[in-house]
């Protein structure tokens, strides 16, 4: 097994130097090796004993009494009270790792049974490199091996703080940069030099991969647009910034999902306008098989129109 974390481009993948990388928020002298800015590999083990919130899966840099993510009205502290675990404890449990293809070039990454909020991450195998989109708390050698077999990871980008989880362990394990929107900086529970805060509406990770900030759910709420996804028609990875719902002719836009607080109509209108500028046919949400395969661009605009009709008339 190879777990040295060196980025592995797909065979023949072009790794041209990206202007976005050179001129973006990466300014700490990290070597630019291609379409992404890649740090030198490290061999640090995951921080197995740092505290992880049992309810939301967020890992913190030091023990603390409360979990700010769960105290926020977009999450909740369970009636049983705040409880903590650790990656070491989780590894001793019965979690089964899962890496399963969900669409062309897109693999779901996570565990069964679900842990905490229950999202799965995605490995997006773009021509410019493999992006881990979003993150999950659980990480072990088996999961790393699965991902290395698929070409490894070149960069990590995350939609919003509920999925920050053990992101620093993931970035350390694979020796890659971690892209977060700076508007959600306050929610980072474990700082790291691997974190690259980007700002503004869009950020080009590479020629074929763009981060977009519709700002639904969290101010920094981000989606990933893969130009060449869906067989060249484009794919959008959304986490729950745009939520896939049971009726695949609709999507949801919520400020708080567990507490049913709707997103502000002005934010939804702005998000719909922003997403209207992107070409995509498939959409990947936050959960296993939460996908809209084909016609997703039309569905998003239709859902936004209905949302605005029902909220502002
Ligand atoms: Zn929490």
Image (cartoon, rainbow, N blue to C red):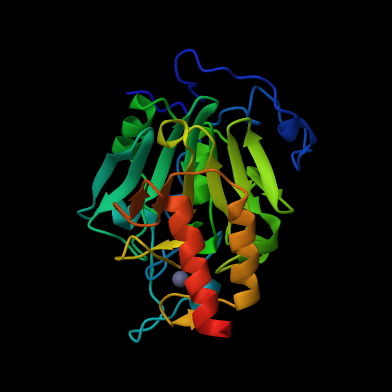
Quarter location, residue 128? top right
- Picture quarter with the N terminus: top left
Identify which residue is drawn at 52% across, 27% down: 129
**Left or right, residue 162 beside residue 110:** right
Identify which residue is drawn at 60% across, 78% down: 264
Identify which residue is drawn at 55% across, 52% down: 223
Residue found at the very far left of the displayed protein:
94
Above-or-below relation of 123 to 17: below
Identify which residue is drawn at 35% across, 39% down: 107
- Picture quarter with the C terminus: bottom right
Q: Position of residue 217 (x, y in %)?
A: 55, 69
> Which residue is more in the foreground, 49 or 139?
139
> Which residue is more in the foreground, 200 or 165?
200
Quarter location, residue 77? bottom left
Q: Is residue 188 visible to the viewer in this orientation of the structure?
A: no
Q: Position of residue 225 (x, y in %)?
A: 54, 43
Above-or-below relation of 313 to 169: below
**Left or right, residue 18 beside residue 235:** right
Q: Position of residue 199 (x, y in %)?
A: 73, 52
> Which residue is more in the foreground, 11 or 303?
303
Q: Position of residue 82 (x, y in %)?
A: 41, 79
**Left or right, residue 66 beside residue 110:** right
Q: Is residue 163 visible to the viewer in this orientation of the structure?
A: yes
């Amino acid at each position: 097994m190879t777990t040295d974390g060196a980025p592995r481009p797909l065979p023949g993948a072009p790794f041209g130097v990206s202007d976005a990388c050179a001129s973006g928020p990466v300014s700490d002298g990290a070597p630019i090796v291609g379409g992404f800015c890649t740090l030198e590999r490290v061999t640090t083990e995951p921080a197995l004993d740092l505290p992880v919130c049992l309810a939301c899966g967020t890992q913190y840099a030091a023990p603390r009494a409360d979990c700010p993510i769960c105290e926020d009205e977009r999450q909740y502290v369970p009636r049983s009270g705040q409880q903590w675990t650790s990656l070491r404890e989780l590894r001793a449990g019965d979690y089964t790792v899962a890496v399963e293809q969900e669409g062309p070039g897109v693999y779901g990454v996570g565990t069964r049974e679900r842990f905490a909020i229950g999202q799965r991450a995605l490995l997006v195998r773009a021509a410019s490199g493999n992006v881990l989109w979003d993150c999950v708390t659980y990480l072990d050698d088996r999961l790393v091996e699965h991902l290395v077999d698929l070409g490894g990871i070149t960069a990590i980008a995350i939609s919003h703080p509920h999925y920050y989880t053990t992101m620093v362990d993931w970035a350390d394990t694979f020796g890659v940069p971690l892209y977060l929107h700076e508007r959600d900086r306050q929610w980072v529970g474990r700082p790291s030099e691997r974190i690259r805060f980007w700002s503004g509406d869009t950020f080009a990770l590479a020629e074929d991969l763009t981060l977009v900030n519709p700002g639904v759910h969290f101010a920094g709420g981000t989606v990933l647009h893969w130009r060449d996804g869906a067989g060249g028609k484009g794919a959008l990875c959304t986490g729950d910034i745009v939520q896939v719902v049971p009726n695949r002719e609709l999507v949801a836009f919520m400020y708080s999902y567990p507490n049913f607080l709707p997103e502000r109509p002005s934010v939804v209108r702005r998000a719909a306008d922003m997403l209207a500028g992107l070409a995509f046919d498939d959409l990947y949400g936050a959960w296993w098989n939460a996908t809209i395969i084909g016609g997703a661009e039309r569905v998003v605009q239709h859902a936004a129109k209905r949302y605005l009709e029902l909220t502002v008339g």
